[in-house]
Image (cartoon, grey):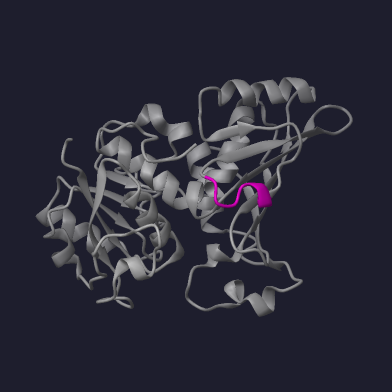
Amino acid sequence: MTAPYTVGIVGARGHTGAELIALIAGHPRLALGFVSSRELAGQPVAGHVKAYTGDLRYVQLDPAAAAAQGVDAVVLALPNGKAGDWVAAIDAAAPQTRVVDLSADYRFDPAWYYGLPELTRAAYRGERRIANPGCYATAMQLAIAPLLDVLAGPPQCFGVSGYSGAGTTPSDRNDPDKLRDNLMPYALTGHVHEREVSQHLGVPVEFMPHVAPHFRGITMTVNLWLRQPMTAEAIRARYTERYAGEPLVRIVEEAPWVSAIAGRHGVEIGGFAVAPGGRRVVVVATLDNLLKGAATQALQNLNRALGLDEFEGIAR
């Protein structure tokens, strides 16, 4: 068997880091080269991620030390605004290393490939610097794209995420006590994912995010105004055609439930409710924010960057 490609993870303490470790542990062609976490340094990875059964321990690496590890790819699972020093160190010492950044730091940089494969696969030109889309942004774009050419105005997107999307640093938005029997709105204008989707779809998008008491999964309800009337059947046919052959996108009749998508790699899109007159349609998309919204999508991008089948190591 061909020697596996090695992958390093920086910022592995968080929920997404743990999902990535599990995915790479189960991948037939990838192996963990290092797992960097300041808080967990010295502890065995297997003690925190059950899917990993090797003897690797978390280490604390600075950017220069990470760049010197000689791995084939590095995934940066850091908070927004923290990736720059790591990218600079890899650019200087190991430019051949593929980098997948999970933060928003390079999603607006035209020098980086924006890796939402279902929509941008044809634009990939072998770039070694890949910006992984945001979780909400993935749901919004997949829900809007099939009707993009017939829109009469900005889509309005009402998003609800489980509290794992708020990360592990304590805050109101990941405090189960404050979220109990509650729905918490935040960043109701100008959210980074609103700007991200507006840039990459090329139309203004209005986004209102909320956090709910469940742990994982996003529900994205999108209100779309059309230039000409359309039937629900014609709209659903557009989505079916657009995502034909996409193993991680499932078109369903009814509005999907977030409880059915938790722990799964794909996206469900459905609802297709058309108001009288045929010019207003509501579409619902659900996905797991830690998987297709982050780790699964990162693995799709890693696979492509390393010349592997895009879906290798992704159970479906």
Percent position of residue 88, x then y: 20, 59
Measured as percent of width and height from the top left, residue 253 is found at: 74, 31
Q: Report which quarter residue 11 is drawn in.
A: bottom left
The x, y position of residue 13, in whole percent, is: 38, 69
Please tell me which residue is depicted at 53% across the width and 48% down the height of the picture.
137
Query: Is 51 left or right of 169, judged from the image as shown?
Result: left
As drawn, is 209 to the left or to the right of 90? right
Q: Which residues are magenta?
A: 258-264
Residue 89 located left or right of residue 197: left
Report the front residue among 15 and 242. Answer: 15
Residue 92 drawn at (x, y percent): 12, 55
Q: For the point 26% across and 60% down, which residue is it? A: 54
| Figure check: 35 above or below 290 | below
Magenta highlight on residue 293: no
Q: How many marks?
A: 0
Residue farthest toward the front in the current orientation of the protein:
53
Res 175 quadrant in image = bottom right
Question: Any magenta on residue 263?
Answer: yes
Q: Nearer the viewer, residue 172 or 278?
A: 172
**Residue that lies at the very extreme toward the right in this rendered image:** 276
Residue 230 visible in image: no
Q: Residue at x 63, y 46 (%)?
A: 286
Give the residue drawn at x 54%, y 64%: 164
- Quarter of the N terminus within the rendering: top left
Closer to the camera, 130 or 6?
Answer: 6
Taking the image as drawn, is residue 161 in sight?
yes
